[in-house]
Amino acid sequence: MAQIFMDLLSSLTNCLFCFPGSPQLKVNNRSFKLLRLLGEGGFSYVYLVQDTSTSQLYALKKIRCPFGQESVSLALKEAEAYALFSPHPHIIHAVDHAVTSANDKSDPGSKTVYILLPYYRRGNLQDAINANLVNHTQFPERRLMILFLGVAKALKAMHQYRVKGAPGGPQSRQNAKKLRQEAEEADKDAARKARSRRKDAHISEEEDIEQEPLMNGEVTRSQEGVEDGEMRAYAHRDVKPGTLRPAWDIPFLFPFDVPPPGPTLTPPTPDFKTGNIMISDSGTSPILMDLGSLAPSPVHITSRALALQTQDLAAEHSTLPYRAPELFDTKTGTVIDAKTDIWSFGCTLFACLVGKSPFEMRSEETGGSLSICVLGGDWRFPDEESMANGGGRRKAKKKGKGKGREADGERGVVEENDGDGDGGGISEGVRGVVRACLRVESAERPDVDEVIGMIEKVVAELPPDDGDGVGGEESEG
């Protein structure tokens, strides 16, 4: 009966969008109906669209590229990275892309980039965290760890990428290079048009040079000089559950094994950044996306200027509560490697268990700076002492407290499996994974293979979750 109701609800909400006069656009001769704005930020917009011929839903990312402010190469870097790691069961792929002239007479060099992506109705991990908080529920531990095993496997594809190697081999690299070449040609065309306009307006060459777009974080270009089969590692640099959104904008408030409804009628969310870890429609598989922050790894910090540049890029692309300490205070003579992702991975796992990043929670408890908490490794599980004070010791329980609540009233803590509400329901194996990832010294953190091994061991030791079904099956890949 519940299934029939959900199917009817999905059909109804789909029909609500199918009214005459819906704006449409074409991407490479495919027509799409714009249903709603999912969010915006900077020069980009994300729309929920529907293919007019198949009724399939997609997420369409539109990026404006005013000449001198946002280059096509930078805008297409995300699609280039998707092509490089495709096909992978836990990394999103770009369905299509297009680069068009913006037809802006005041800026003849401006371009518009469209990237068509799959649409996942279950949303991202942050949406699931929000749903847990609203419904006073928690992630079943075993299913959660299986999801994170998929995330770790996606990171492994990046951290251990070999030129012309898996997952897509030579064809994926060729597709990525074509995207890079297309972007460079578009930027050259934009530069020619801009120069022509400036020449007609008698603008000096010096001013023209200042308008040239700048590039950073190369993808395929960073492989130059690397032999086929040799490693050219990359780091994601912005692993996180997603962007926190208000409860009325959560696309689903259902457990993993209940089908979500169709698209929801919600207002657009300002400055919304599409979640970096999506959940497949089956609820069993994570999908890592938003590779615009992707960076070659390792980076040897050989000068103070490079250290400051690395910090600035991290401030722009790496979300504060999930950012590794070496990206807060980058020192000359150090090496920034892919273990920045391991730190973010640990923060994200903690957020799924507790309701927020460990350093958000700790800074709210102490009233101190979040960055100071990160640099000092000052965090704790709700029922433990701070890791900065030795960590791992359970706090004495207070008598008479209610179930499902933290002893100090911490609102972000979800109800634990054993019902004591003080974080004691988090199994020791899961805690161990978080602790290993959140070591301040990057050299002390495990690499991605060690993380995968730890998670596989935890999953094997955890008992089946209550009602194991769709979510209890191990995710593909």
Image: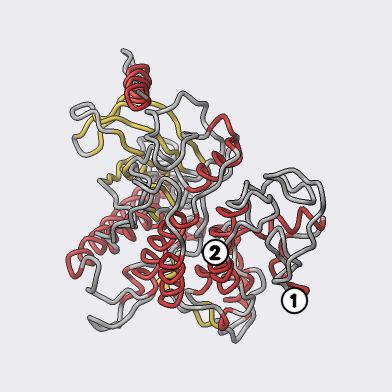
Residue 145: percent from the left, percent from the top? 45, 60
Instruction: Spot the residue most to the top.
Output: 20
Judging by the rendered image, the residue that carries numbered circle 1 is 390
Closer to the camera, 389 or 77? 389
> In terms of sequence position, does the residue under pointer 2 or pointer 1 come before the other?
2
Up/down of 106 relative to 474, above or below: above
Amino acid type at image mark 2: Ser
Residue at figure coordinates x 40%, y 76% from the top left: 449
Figure quadrant of residue 154: bottom left
From mark 2 to mark 1, how far is it between C-alphas? Answer: 21 Å
In this rendering, position of residue 365 left or right of residue 167: right
Whole-percent x and y of residue 403?
Answer: 70, 44
Residue 322 image point, x, y percent: 59, 60
Q: Which residue is mark 2?
A: 344
From the image, which quarter does the N terminus lie in?
A: top left
The amino acid type, in three-letter code, at marker 1 is Gly
Give the residue displayed 44% in from the left and 27% down from the top. Answer: 264
**Which color scheme does this rendered protein use?**
secondary structure
Q: Residue at x 29, y 52 (%)?
A: 93
Instruction: Report the number of discs.
Output: 2
User: Who is closer to the viewer here, 375 or 5?
Assistant: 5
Q: Secondary structure at mark 2?
A: helix
Quadrant in the picture for the C terminus: bottom left
Residue 327 percent across, percent down from the top left: 60, 70
Mark 2 or 1: in front is 1
Q: What residue do we see at 40% from left, 63% from top?
A: 149
